[in-house]
Every structure is written in structure tokens, then in C-alpha cells.
Amino acid sequence: MQEIDGHTRLCGLIGNPVEHTMSPAIHNTLAKQEGRNLVYVPFHVEKGQVGQAVKGAFALNVLGLNVTVPYKSEVIEYLDGIDDMAEKIGAVNTLVRTKNGYKGYNTDITGLYCAMCSEGIRLEGEEILVLGAGGAARAAAFLCASKGAKKVYILNRTVEKAKAVEEEVNRIFHTQCASAMCTEDYKKLGTDRKYLAIQATSVGLYPDTEKAVILDREFYERIHTGFDLIYRPFCTKFMSLVREAGGQAFHGLKMLLYQGVEAYELWNGIGVEEEDIQALYGVLLKAMEI
Ligand code: ATR
């Protein structure tokens, strides 16, 4: 633990709930690796108090904040600036202190991109299936469109929600690449090619580890790579079904890793060394085993 003195800078997480977060482990490990006098703590913020929380944090000289559920959109009106991509998606997870207030960023998206790149996954020119149409799926669909995917099929149990994501993506990126479908309609996708699939629903999350949105092998035979945003467990049902059908599959812990690293870099105006990122990943893997 960092020794706290008169120069210690504070960063933290605002959300509700925040009690199960891995973010303190990420940022306090990075600060320790670097010998930086910074500590990171979770702040449980009650409904209706997010504006006051941001204002109070600024007054207290807090260096930076992460924002989690349910405040990623609500917090925007209390910011002094917003990054382009975060504005497009309408959600921020990182606030960086500037002269008169905080500027909002979305490192969930850049973190997902870094995680995919680190696994050698390409988005440009790809045909991609996004499972889900909630906040996480929306971020994934936005990322795919912004990186020049050829097609982004959004498959969801509630097709109206998939349609809303489709419309937004196509409008914002001036494209027609997004296309909504109800989950069972994967059968209409051709079998002459294989897809990258991003699992962005909450199905399969611990303790429901035997569940997946689609169980049918016919679906998984269409997948060359499966990326699950879930990281608890490390091998989800979705991932094992992808592997059983011959594809490669990855879990979401690297997305968590890189969203944290990028936030830390923004707060401190530095680049974290690859060696330190790998060491941090080791710490996260270990923490997850407990
Ligand atoms: P997040 O912000 O983490 O993405 P969310 O907004 O609650 O969370 O979205 C959860 C996603 O998982 C949605 O796409 C949801 O489908 P619906 O839009 O039809 O609700 C999907 N999901 C959750 N439970 C599901 C289940 N049992 N079967 C299929 N999809 C499910």
C-alpha cells in the first residue's frame, strides 16, 4: 500500500454499487509499480447525487475518476468537456481533471480495442456478430463501426433494442453497416463464411456459468473467433462452444486491464510500459483466482 502523506493524489470510482470493483487493484498496483504517490478508492454514490459528487471531487483536488453503472451517461452534463468518441456513444467511464472541471473519456471502448489488438483480432473489413444490445453491446458495435467493419449484425432477444443500436450506429458513423436481428435469426446468416462474434450480454456471468445466449452448434460453426466481454469465469459457456466448433475464444479480462491502463495514463499524462502492463495482468489473474 502506498504511504500517504501531504502530497498524495487521489483518484477513485463513482458508481452504485462499487463494492465488487477490481479498479482499486489496477490503479494501486500501477501506482506502486511506478512509485507514484497516488491512491485509488471506490466511492458509493447515491441516486441523484452524481452532480454533487463530481463537483465535490473537483473541489477536493481529486485527480481523476472512473464512472461505472448507473452513471456513465448521467455524469456527462456535469463535465467541462468530452472526448469525441465518448460524446458519440453518450457514455463516459473516465474523468480527467482539467483547469475548470473534468473532461470525459470512454476507455471501455479503447480498452476493448487494445484487448482485441493484443489478441491479433482485426475489425476493419470484417463481418461481426454482436450478441446483446445493452450498454456493453452498444460500445462494441460503436467500436466495430468506427474501425471500418464491413457488417455489424446486432443480435438480441429484444429486437427493438437491437434496432435502436442499429439506427444510432448507422446515423452517427454515416454508414449502413449495422443491422439488427433477433437472436434466432443467426440461421439466416450464410454458411459460406465465418464471423467474429462479440458476446456482450450478461448471460454466462458467474454463477450462471453453464448458460449462453445461443447453445446451438450450428451457430458456433459460423464463428472463427469469439470474444466474450465477461471475465468471470475465464472460460464462459460461449467460449467453450466456440472452441468445440473449432474457433478461437478470448475472455474479457484484457479489456478490463486496458481500460484501466488508459485511464491511468490519461490522469498522469504518461505511457505505462508494456512490462508493467504484463505484470499488472498477472496481478489481476491472481486476484481473480481467489
Ligand atoms: P450492460 O449495460 O452490461 O450491457 P444491460 O444493458 O442490462 O447490461 O444489457 C444486458 C444484455 O444482455 C441485453 O442485451 C439483454 O437482452 P434484452 O435486451 O433482451 O434484455 C441480454 N440478456 C440478459 N439476460 C438475457 C437472457 N436470459 N437471454 C438473452 N439475453 C439476455
Image: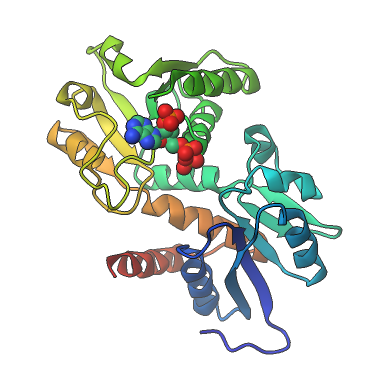
In the image, residue 12 above or below residue 145: below
Image location (x, y in percent) of residue 123:
43, 30
Q: Position of residue 165 (x, y in %)?
A: 54, 24
- Left or right placement of residue 6 versus residue 276 in this view: right
- Can you give x and y, in whole percent of width and height, for residue 188 in the image? 29, 10
Q: Position of residue 175 (x, y in %)?
A: 57, 15
Pick whichever, 99 or 180, lies toward us.
180
Q: What kind of colouring is applied to the model shown?
A: rainbow
Which quadrant of the view contains residue 215? top left
Residue 181 drawn above or below residue 62: above
Q: Return the residue nearer the eye: 28 or 14.
A: 14
Image quadrant assignment for residue 91: top right
Q: Is residue 260 visible?
A: yes
Q: Residue at x 51, y 79 (%)?
A: 32
Q: Is residue 244 left or right of residue 25?
A: left
Instruction: Locate residue 202 relative to residue 161 in the image: left or right.
Output: left
Vertical comparison of 113 with 187: above or below: below
Q: Nearer the viewer, residue 126 or 263?
A: 263
Residue positioned 55% across, 75% down in the render: 31
Quadrant in which the C terminus appears: bottom left
Q: Could you tell me which residue is drawn at 60 percent across and 78 percent down? A: 36
Q: Is residue 100 left or right of residue 120?
A: right
Q: Residue at x 74, y 51 (%)?
A: 103
Q: Which residue of the protein is positioned furthest toward the right in this rendering?
A: 100
Rendering quadrant holding ligand 1? top left
